[in-house]
Image (cartoon, helix red, strand yellow):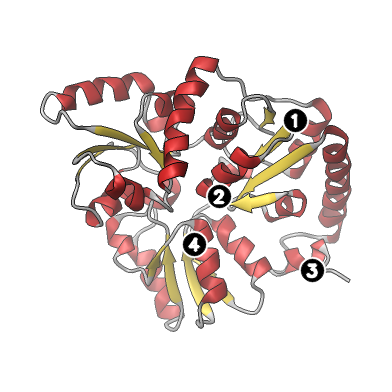
Amino acid sequence: MGVTLEEKLSRLGAGLYDAETVAELERDLEEIRLLKKKHGAVLLAHNYQRPEIFEVADFVGDSLELARKAAEVSAPVIVFCGVHFMAETAKILCPESRVLLPNLAAGCSLAEAATAEAVRRKAAELRKDYPDLAVVSYVNTTAEVKAVSDVCVTSANAVKIVNALPNETILFLPDRNLAAYVAKNSKKRIIPWEGDCYVHHQLAPKDILETRKAFPKAKVLVHPECRTDVLDLADAILSTSGMIRYAQESDAEEFIVVTECGLSDRLMIEVPHKRFYKSCNLCKYMKMITVPDTRRTLERLAPEIRLSREVMDAARRTITRMLELA
């Protein structure tokens, strides 16, 4: 017999999910399963989602893995449990599918930090001094920004792709922290955009040092969207799925997980024989996606992601180039 939802959620701590809440979730989750079957829908979920969402996800992963999976999907309906730019990426890669996002307000501080027009202006200005400039956009950008970029990257492949480009000068947007991490691991001239992920940027060295003092044997796993002074404290700098693989394969028994708190929840559920300590913040946008909203989305087949064909075609070029280079 498999592990019940109640048993899985209990691993996150006593009292977080009471019996009544779990029973309501189980009813909604069963309805979601039936609606997925009815509509031939595939449900993709990011690692930062609420743990109960994972129960009905066909695939859970980081941004790179979800982009790859979306490129493979041939379902008529895709439900994306993540934030807006991720659902846009799925629509770009699957233009004939109906891509649904349970809450259109689920945005991203990074995606909001750059507009297509601002990127065009900045790139034109920089090319006066750096004619070989390449515009490299983190996947945490709008479809319109991807459309005016040369290539996309994720936290898992940013260093590899930047180093693979023939261009010596890179406008890297919109995350200044990831840009700094790439610059440290590349000989290219990296010009950063002045954006950041508020979840990771607010994490400070004192947070990690306090946790490490309490758990001195724990390995410190840090996401590259964190500030440089936080990255300097890491035993390993990894994407979210990289953290999962590291925790599963490492001989270490204890880990301090420095990223959005949902990743720690997933680890506590899926790797119960090891210990995970949170040094994290919650992403208010990721947590906007709930099981009841996901059920209602499948009932109504809305809200739907809509993009112009012109934007999708231009943005697809940059994502496809990323997948080829990665």
Q: Is residue 84 left or right of residue 194?
A: right
Q: Is residue 106 left or right of residue 6?
A: left
Residue 276 seen in render: no
Residue 167 seen in render: yes
Q: CA distance from mark 1 to mark 4?
A: 30 Å
**Tag 4 secondary structure:** helix
Q: Position of residue 60 (x, y in %)?
A: 64, 52
Q: Are marks 2 and 4 in contact (CB under 8 Å)?
A: no
Q: CA distance from mark 2 to mark 4?
A: 11 Å
User: For mark 3, what is the residue?
Assistant: 7
Q: Is residue 72 left or right of residue 151?
A: right
Q: Position of residue 274 (x, y in %)?
A: 60, 78
**Tag 3 secondary structure:** helix
Q: Are marks 2 and 1 in contact (CB under 8 Å)?
A: no
| Amino acid type at image mark 1 | Pro
User: For mark 4, what is the residue?
Assistant: 242
User: For mark 1, what is the residue?
Assistant: 76
Q: State which tag comes first along the sequence, 4 or 3.
A: 3
**Tag 1 secondary structure:** loop
Q: Quadrant of the N terminus?
A: bottom right
Q: State which tag comes first along the sequence, 2 or 1.
A: 2
